[in-house]
Image (cartoon, helix red, strand yellow):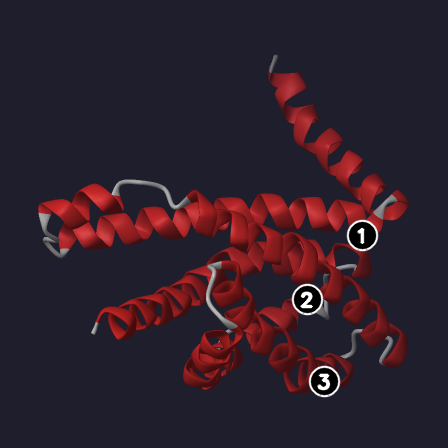
Amino acid sequence: MIEILQRFPRRLWSAFDESTKRRPLLTKCAVGAVLGTTGDLGVQAMERRQKATQGASDSLQTAGTRIDAARTTRIAIWRATLHTTFAHHWFNLLERSVPGSAPALVAKKIFLDQVFASPFLHVFFLPYMALAEGHTMEEAVGRTRENFVKLLQASFCYWPFVHCITFSVIPLRHRVAFVNIAAVFWMATLSALNQTAREADRLGTTG
């Protein structure tokens, strides 16, 4: 039994590794969906605990105990399709343009990623979420205008450090999966900013 348990992680990793070679984009999208779902569920759990410790009213606590399945679905779709597909092609292009893992090359990749890829991705996240929630294009643009700079500033404090590992020791075919794992923690920031924007939209509507 112990031997079986010891072999299972190795076999699972071997199957995953082989899948990234044979069906790279499909495998990465599947990983993105799983991690996007689990990441947002984890963030929602933390938010519920925070509301409880802050002594929210009974009505808010009751609402806070429910899982927002629609929100999780929106996050999973973003992570599995839009983000993962872009990251897959971007990392391949980056490696072809700047091959190697020497410190100077890693620094160059991080610079290019933060100057081009990060703003491109993040400028679409907030409007995507707003439109998926049923808001108008004008409201989606307004939410982006209000929160984009804060989102990008937070990104610059997190992703360059993650990518020191991404571009130096992680094989190319596993970089998207690694970034999706790192994004589980980043989702807390994304969700918090988007939730703040949702509350601002709600108060603006009812005010």
Q: Which residue is at a point 36% across and 42% down the rendered structure image?
A: 67
Q: Which residue is at a point 62% across and 78% down the rendered structure image?
A: 118
In the picture, measured across the screen, residue 105 lies left or right of residue 2, that is right
Between 98 and 134, which is closer to the camera in this rendering? 134
Q: Which residue is at a point 25% across and 46% down the rendered structure image?
A: 64
The residue pinned by badge 2 equals 166
| Residues packed near mark 3 inside 10 Å, few (<14), some (14 to 19) or many (20 plus) | some
The residue pinned by badge 1 equals 25
Compared with 191, 98 (above or below) is: below
Give, as a three-letter code, the residue at label 3.
Leu
Which is more N-terminal, label 2 or label 1? 1
Give, as a three-letter code, the residue at label 1.
Leu
In the picture, measured across the screen, residue 74 lies left or right of residue 90, that is left
Query: Quadrant location of residue 102?
Result: bottom right
Tag nearer the camera, 1 or 3: 1
Q: Quadrant of the C terminus?
A: bottom left
The residue pinned by badge 3 equals 112
